[in-house]
Image (spheres, grey):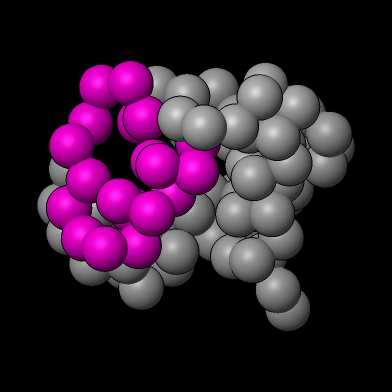
Amino acid sequence: MTVLKNFSKWKEFLNERIDQAQAAGINDETIKNIAYQIGDYLAKNVDPQNNEERLLKELWEVGTEDEQKTLAGLMVKLVDQK
């Protein structure tokens, strides 16, 4: 995934997907759950492409499931700032 090479581009990509989901009527809780699933997949299957992603992966790996969900929710919040 080329958007993973640059963290700013990754955040822009996530913001666009969140905007699309919101426009489609998907509620915030569902968006956070999807973010958790994506975060879990990335942590398990994708090699970090930059320092920010490496930090997120390390935090993900030491976190409990609840903490991972919080981290996913924070990522949604970070990229969805209006």
Along the viewing direction, whichever of 30 and 24 lies nearer the viewer: 30
Q: Is residue 9 left or right of residue 36?
A: left
Extreme residue toward the front, this view: 62
| Residue 30 covered by magenta stretch | no
**What span is in magenta?**
42-60
Residue under the image location 40 percent in, 42 percent down: 58
In this rendering, the answer to whether 81 lies above or below 64 is: below
Q: Residue at x 21, y 60 (%)?
A: 50
Residue 68 visible to the viewer: yes
Q: For the point 54% across and 61% down, which residue is it?
A: 15
Q: Residue at x 52, y 32 (%)?
A: 62
Choose between 35 and 23: the one closer to the eye.
35
Query: In the figure, residue 82 lies in which quadrant?
Result: bottom right
Residue 78 point in image, percent of width and height: 64, 66
Is 58 on the left-hand or right-hand side of 46? right
Q: Tell me which secondary structure the magenta stretch mostly adopts.
A: helix
Q: Which quarter of the figure has residue 77?
A: bottom right
**Residue 49: image x %, image y %?**
17, 53
Q: Is residue 56 magenta?
A: yes
- Name the image quarter holding the N terminus: top left
Q: Position of residue 34 (x, y in %)?
A: 62, 28
Q: What is the count of numbered marks? A: 0
Of residues 52 and 14, the one drawn nearer to the viewer in this rendering: 52
Quick check: 33 above or below 76?
above
- Residue 11: x %, y % from top left: 44, 64
In this rendering, the answer to whether 1 lies above or below 33 is below
Residue 34 visible in the picture: no
Judge whether 15 appears above or below 32 on screen: below
Q: Is residue 31 left or right of residue 75?
A: right
